[in-house]
Image (tube, coloured by chain):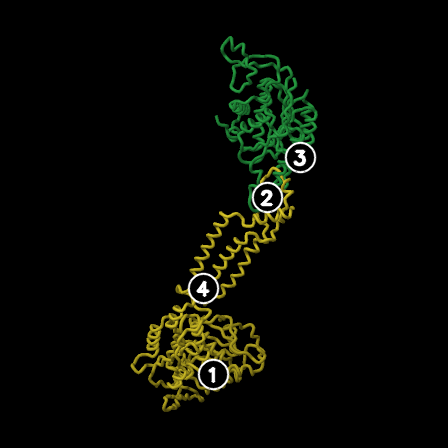
Amino acid sequence: MSALSPTVVAAIDDLELAARIVVEGLRTGGHRSPFHGYSTEFRQHRPYRAGDDLKYLDWKLFARSDRLYTRQFRETTNLSVMIVLDTSASMAYPPHGVSKFQYGQIVAAALSYLVSEQGHAVGLMTMDAGKLSYVAARGGRQHLRALLARIDRFKPAGAWDPARVIARSAQLLQRRGVVIVISDFYDAEEDTRREMRRVAQRGHDVAMLQLISPSEMDLPYAEHVELEDLESGVRRLVDATTIAPAYHDAMHDFLARCRSHALRDGVDYALMSTATPPETALRDYLLRRSRGLVAGHAPRAVQK
Amino acid sequence: MTWGNAWAFIGLAALALPVLIHLLSRGHARVHRFPTLRFLEASRLLPTRRTRVHDLLLLAVRAGILAAAVIALAQPVWRTANRTRALGRTLARAIVVDTSASMNRVTLSGDRAIDSAHSEARRFAAQAQTSTVIATHSPSAAIPAAVEWLNRQQGRGELVVVSDFQDGAVTAAGLSVLPHAFGVKLARIPVKELATPVELMSRFGTDEMTARTTVTLASTNVDWTLRAPLARRGDDQLSVLAGPGERARADAAIRAAGTIAVRLPLDSVHTIAVVLPQFAQRAELVRASNAPLSRWATDVVARLRSDSLLLVVASASADVPTAVDTVGGIVVARTAAGRPAVMAKQDTARGHERLLLFSFADAGSLTSAALIAATNTARSLALPLTELDPSTLSDATLASWQREPAAEAPPRNNANARGGTSDGRWLWLLALLLLALETWMRRALPPASAHGLAADSRERAA
């Protein structure tokens, strides 16, 4: 099964359905879920699926029934995942096609679905109209639906304060958990980096999913254009042809800086292009995360 | 190379337009919403008012389009050897046909001279590749116009005058304006001698004396006749309206005016009245008449205004006390002080047109006598005396003025490029090709300066 394009996924009105499709696509890849294996108390059996870790196979049951079953465990130390979604106006780019915000919504929903399905708690922290908007990390189907509805409700507008949102999301996690920040990271670069480092130092697992559209990598204009900042509304007349090389360099420097700082600060980093199918981008990210290959992600021993 | 319309080169000033527009215009940049401008801060922004010429190649092509169009409008003609030889074989003729009154005489073959002149003109025109015919009663005055026309033609040029060549019809001074490269051909239409007698009439008291003069090349004969006035000469068409108190003086003025000879015949159709200052109904006539005159009356007034005797006498007279401003009309003559001495109006109250000449001079004055005499002269329908002069330019004189056109046409900057001789069409074709090239460059090629400027930008950033 080939991955659905971002345009197709974004066209699905029901975010839960979109998330499920993305997650099903992940499973087809046959890799091991990176969020699995934190629990120890047996909960139930389920039929074996290709890709399940063989160590969870119930061999005794296989001997009795001649069928393969995988053991699933109750969460004894429920993992809390807090998703931080950037809702600033800069995420509303590009104006045509799949915007970064739409892409971020799908990624956030898919991660929420994945985490919740695995019995973990998932919450949401973002900023809406200058105020923090928080959904506590919990498990369960009802909570997932409420969470997805909340994600679906947001519209990109204005500016946001990423450092404050990240700091608050870490505070509200009851215990050590995972903080996944989905943003373009254009705002308050230094403060954001400092706050993510601080959260990571406090024992949280911090992931930095940077979204970018291909048309941002290089100025897609020629001759003289007047560019209007989506967040501040400031306009500037530029000769796009002339400044394109310098812009290209500055943008690549920025992305390289984000990556290197994440590596240095022990933060997971993944750059996701809105042109890449979300399931592909997520699969690559999760696969690398599970193998400890994600930039900035140092494989750590899972503590129960 | 010659130019049919050299003034079109003024259009070359338009070449400055694309450069000025490029340099001065701020441009109407389209607005695009963009996530952040922070990475533009790091780039060195060009000033919004462009002071550098970008895309020099494109600018050069655009300027080339304008230049080609301007040169095409100037109607260039390349003088190749073949073309020069072909031009040398072409002949342009400006044919001046004399239509003066003397050309109404008959030729030796019995035709009217004017008809023969037109036949000759057509024959001359047929011999030339380009020609124009100028019919005029004064050939000498038409020569500059003919030269002007010849100057605008390609090839050799020749002036042809078809006339009976009375004395003064063409003069050496008149022909001197003709450039030496142009030829001169003077074609005489031989006419019979004018045998029409000239009648001059003057009056002495109640008698009328007529001098009948017949002029020929050999002799001049005059017959004098003294007799009573004849009404057929239109005497009753001129009346002098005087008041009772000035009648005697008016009669004296009429008698004095009668002694000045007038050429017969006189106009016996139109009526003219000289209104003296004390005429009883003068005020009514002033009110009943108006200033706009009919054509014949205008001709009479024009002749009066050019009558030297009337002008001299009126300007020598003392100022008149009459309130002339209330009369209105056209001033015929003025006093020394510049006030009107005679004014003309037209009366149509009686169903027929009558020219009224309001005099402000005393009835017995010299001005009144001169006015009556001038009016009589102005009523004459006889031909100008110059047209009756039987003497003509000799054949030897005409032969000395004639010359052949130059064997090779001289280069003329204002050469007429009409008739498909201009090579401008090739330049229009070039302009179209450049336009296509410009369109292709705009669409297909990246801005030529982009890489160079980018490198420049990087250097500056460094």
Q: Residue at x 60, y 51 (%)?
A: B50
- Drawing shade for chain A: green
Disc 2 from disc 1: Cα separation? 101 Å
Earlier residue among tags 4 and 1: 4
Dot 3 amino acid type:
Glu
Identify which amino acid the numbered label 1 is placed on: Ala
- SS of the residue at dot 2? helix
Tell me the quadrant of the picture where the N terminus of chain B can be found: bottom left
Location of mark 1 (residue): B373
Instruction: Report whether mark 2 lies on the same chain as mark 1.
Output: no
Q: Nearer the viewer, residue B408 or A248?
A: A248
Q: Are marks 4 and 1 in contact (CB under 8 Å)?
A: no
First of labels 2, 3 by sequence position = 3
According to the picture, the residue beneath numbered tag 2 turns out to be: A245
- Depth check, mark 4 against mark 1: the one in front is 4
Mark toward the viewer: 4 or 3: 3
Mark 3 — residue?
A189
Left or right for B347, reference A195: left
Packing grade of label 2 (10 A; few <14, some 14-19, many >=20) is: many
B55 and B260: which one is in front?
B55
Query: Within 10 angstroms of label 3, few (less than 14), some, or many (20 or more) residues?
Result: some
Chain for disc number 4: B
What separation in Å lies between label 4 and label 3 (alpha carbons)?
68 Å
Q: Are marks 4 and 2 on the same chain?
A: no
